[in-house]
Image (spheres, rainbow, N blue to C red):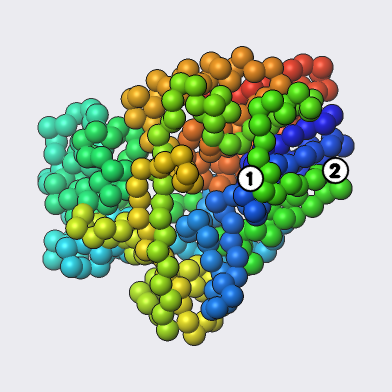
Amino acid sequence: MNFAIVGAGFTGAVLAQELAKAGHTISVFESRNHIAGNCYSERDEKTGVMLHKYGPHIFHTDNEAVWNYVNQYTEFMPYINRVKTTSQGRVFSLPINLHTINQYFNKTLSPAEAKAFIQSIADNTIQEPQSFEEQAMKFVGKDLYEAFFKGYTIKQWGVSPTELPASILKRLPVRFNYDDNYFNHKYQGMPKEGYTPIVEALLSHENIQTHLNTSFKAEQAKEFDHVFYTGPIDAWFNYEEGRLGYRTLDFVREDHDGDYQGCAVMNYGDQNVPYTRISEHKHFAPWETHEQTVIFKEYSRECTEDDIPYYPIRLVNEKAMLNVYIEKAKAQTNVSFLGRLGTYRYLDMDVTIAEALDASQKTLEAIAKGKSIPSLFIDIAG
């Protein structure tokens, strides 16, 4: 079959590779001048530092199949993400752990004592948290919430934490030991030469043609047996119901000599600091040595039509609008919607890859059985 894949990020590249291996012809359309989407990485000409152009990406997963899959295409180096945060003039480790608790409250609590202490300062009057703020107050109390979450969240999302759903915070990570590994996943690492070579390898198949700087219009779908679309779901329908809400990021670069902050990521929890965090990219490759360094101050704001969308907001009005677009998507006969933008969800890289592998398998099964390919492979209702 002759397939079009719109978008050359991980979703499109994995899907292209799997369908091409099965003997199908693939045309990949990418509106940017490079592959790999927001995972795009490149060597900085000035410093030699590997830069994550669209912000830091750390690979972490419990999915062994996904870990084995990406390791086919590049060499991964051990990497543990250890995030720090500056709050109220002091530096702490995140996620909140025993060191954070003892340092913040100037105590020397044991794990059991710290657990009891946090329970004593938490807001136990909140039974079923409805908002982000209530979720945080219920689990860590007012002091830790205001130090580490309130200001950062207001800057990140542009609204009060009282307006955000509790689900954004999910299970608040609080550790009653000195583990400062930001992630809990079994497999963690960083590709030695960045993420771009992985996507290059995925797209390097004789059955795949990649077209950069090339937008894809809905009317072109009739030229292919099926289209896999990883762009914004509302854009496919010409924003007929309005634009879904996103936050976008602005990165302000600074070059310095030596080591600027001593870690890869430093969050800034105070609301009066305009940026949310500073990333120092040479620390994402600790096996390399660089005399100069590059940092990026990261600012979050509302996404306009000319910006790159990063985080779907999914507040009440976005969910209602999304559900209308979902019904429109289901009515499509030869288009499937996948990926972060196509399903209007924030997705980690491992989930993106797992869903693309699953979609490719279901596509091949549908073809073998003479059935239609699903327009949506999972439930993405608001």
Q: Give 348 or 16, whichever is nearer the viewer.
A: 16
Q: Position of residue 158 (x, y in %)?
A: 28, 43
Q: Nearer the viewer, mark 2 or mark 1?
A: 1
Q: Residue at x 62, y 58 (%)?
A: 195
Picture quarter with the C terminus: top left
Q: Nearer the viewer, residue 300 or 15?
A: 300
Vertical position of residue 155 compared to residue 363: above or below? below
Of pointers 2 and 1, the one earlier in the residue sequence: 1
User: Which numbered marker is on residue 136?
Assistant: none
Disc 2 secondary structure class:
loop
Q: How far from the left and from the top, in percent, is residue 152? A: 27, 51
Please report the residue visible at 18 percent of the width from the left and 68 percent of the height from the top: 89
Q: Circle 2 is placed at which residue position? A: 207
Note whether 104 is above or below 258 in the view shown: above
Residue 348 position, x and y percent, is: 51, 45
* 355 horizontally vs 86: left or right: right
Q: Residue at x 87, y 48 (%)?
A: 206
Residue drawn at point x = 58 percent, y = 20 percent? 329
**Whole-percent x and y of residue 53?**
52, 60
Residue 189 can be seen, yes or no: yes
Mark 2 crowd level (few <14, some 14–19, many ≥20, 10 Å Cα):
some
Question: On the rendered image, what quadrant is the N terminus found in?
Answer: top right
Q: What amino acid type should be assigned to the residue bearing mark 2? A: Asn
Q: Is residue 74 above or below residue 317?
A: below
Amino acid residing under circle 1: Ser
Query: Which numbered circle lies on residue 31?
Result: 1
Q: 10 Å neighbourhood of mark 1: few (<14), some, or many (≥20)?
A: some
